[in-house]
Image (cartoon, rainbow, N blue to C red):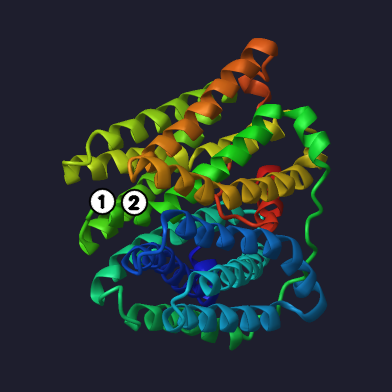
């Protein structure tokens, strides 16, 4: 395992630098939009555009990789993401930001696809799960680092946009100069949504709605924080504790998911996510308590997606895993696209507190649908017949579905 990490340091270095930049960018744009007095609904639309671009990139980028190769795609998309970030700081305009966010989303989806397929190639049957776990830890850990870089320069100036551009550009260097040959690449093909829904209505509904919830938390969390008067360091803490919660919960929830019927787990963590959001609503006057509650929001909310994917696979044959997981990733992207805009519409009418109201409503909705499915279809997959849980982050691409399937087979 250590040899794999050592030999693949350009890959993990690239992941780290890209996600530090991406984590900082998402928070910075929310704060800057508030400084520039964008309307709340406009900011929500800007944030939604990223997920629209990401969804398009998840579908189209594999075609680009197949046609021109990994390194060319990585170089082009990193350059595009870097340049687009700079233009955010130069042209502070909602229309341009919508276009730029869509381009950024497309670019980052392509970068993830290259990195994830390369990661799969450097793995072996003995260490693939550990490599995927290292990737997940690097993904979330670098996002936490990105939150605290918000403190090093005023968000109303261009310096932070320049820093993000530099981070993404530096990530490009070691991978572009790597001597390792590019891996063979074959994009997984999703199976039809009707087939997946027929197998697991809860899995499909769960990934769509949890996608909306995760995009609201990532995209609109900084907007809420800025609207309620938090200082920059408090905004950084607010978002960092949310992400840290996601990191800490993956193993415990995965452990429970492999030992308790998964529909019960989905119901429980959706309910706890909703309760945690409600506690955040009532702890806004106490920053330490708010951070703690955001930690639990992240722990519960960002774990639902992985359990829903595992739950869906429990109702499918092994040959369908990759296609179904690829479809669920795309459906998660659809939910992510609509989430920020819908939440900000409510915030426009009811004020910043509607942020937590929207989050709570989303996760209680998953809980209620899970209870409904239990009532109309009490038949469950026994714990002994369940497949293995494998943690997947909510911005995964279809390539991760293929990696996960290979881990499960081992």
Q: Which mark is residue 224?
A: 2
Could you tell me which residue is drawn at 55 percent across and 58 percent down?
A: 131
Quarter holding residue 177: bottom right
Residue 229, percent from left and from top: 22, 55
Residue 355 lies, with reference to residue 132, above or below; the image says above
The foreground one among 240 and 154 is 154
Residue 398 lies, with reference to residue 193, above or below; the image says below
Residue density around tag 2, few if under 14, some if 14–19, many if 20 or more, within 10 Å: many
The foreground one among 322 and 43 is 43
Quarter holding residue 374: top right
Residue 296, percent from left and from top: 34, 38
Q: CA distance from mark 1 to mark 2?
A: 6 Å
Whether residue 384 appears in this view of the structure is yes
Could you tell me which residue is drawn at 43 percent across and 48 percent down?
A: 217
Could you tell me which residue is drawn at 50 percent across and 36 percent down?
A: 254
Q: Which mark is residue 228?
A: 1
Residue 285, percent from left and from top: 17, 41
Could you tell me which residue is drawn at 59 percent across and 71 percent down?
A: 99
Do the residues under discs 1 and 2 have CB atoms within 8 angstroms? yes
């Amino acid at each position: 395992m250590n040899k794999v990490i050592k030999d693949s340091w350009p890959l993990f270095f690239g992941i780290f630098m890209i996600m530090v930049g991406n984590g900082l960018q998402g928070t910075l744009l929310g704060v800057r939009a508030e400084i520039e007095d964008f309307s709340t609904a406009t900011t929500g639309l800007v944030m939604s555009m990223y997920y629209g671009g990401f969804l398009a990139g998840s579908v189209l980028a594999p075609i680009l990789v197949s046609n021109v190769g990994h390194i060319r795609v990585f170089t082009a998309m990193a350059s595009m993401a870097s340049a687009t970030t700079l233009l955010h700081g130069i042209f502070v305009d909602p229309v341009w930001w919508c276009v730029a966010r869509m381009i950024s989303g497309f670019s980052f989806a392509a970068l993830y696809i290259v990195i994830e397929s390369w990661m799969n190639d450097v793995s072996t049957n003995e260490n693939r799960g550990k490599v995927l776990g290292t990737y997940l830890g690097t993904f979330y850990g670098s996002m936490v680092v990105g939150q605290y870089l918000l403190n090093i320069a005023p968000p109303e100036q261009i310096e932070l946009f320049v820093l993000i551009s530099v981070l993404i550009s530096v990530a490009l260097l070691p991978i572009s100069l790597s001597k390792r040959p590019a891996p063979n690449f074959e994009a997984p093909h999703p199976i039809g949504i009707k087939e997946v829904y027929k197998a697991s209505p809860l899995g499909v509904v769960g990934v769509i709605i949890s996608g909306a919830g995760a995009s609201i938390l990532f995209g609109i969390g900084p907007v809420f924080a800025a609207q309620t008067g938090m200082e920059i360091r408090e905004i950084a803490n607010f978002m960092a504790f949310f992400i840290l919660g996601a990191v800490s919960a993956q193993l415990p929830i995965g452990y429970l998911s492999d030992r308790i019927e998964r529909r019960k787990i989905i119901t429980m963590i959706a309910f706890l996510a909703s309760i945690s959001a409600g506690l955040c609503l009532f702890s806004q006057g106490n920053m330490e308590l708010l951070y703690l509650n955001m930690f639990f929001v992240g722990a519960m909310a960002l774990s639902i997606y992985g359990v829903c994917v595992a739950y869906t696979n429990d109702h499918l044959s092994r040959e369908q895993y990759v296609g179904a997981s690829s479809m669920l990733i795309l459906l998660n992207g659809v939910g992510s696209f609509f989430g920020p805009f819908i939440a900000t519409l409510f915030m426009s009418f009811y004020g910043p507190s509607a942020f937590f109201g929207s989050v709570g409503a989303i996760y209680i909705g998953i809980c209620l649908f899970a209870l409904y499915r239990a009532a109309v279809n009490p038949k469950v997959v026994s714990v002994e017949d369940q497949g293995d849980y494998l943690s997947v982050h909510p911005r995964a691409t279809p390539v991760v579905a293929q990696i996960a399937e290979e881990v499960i087979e081992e």
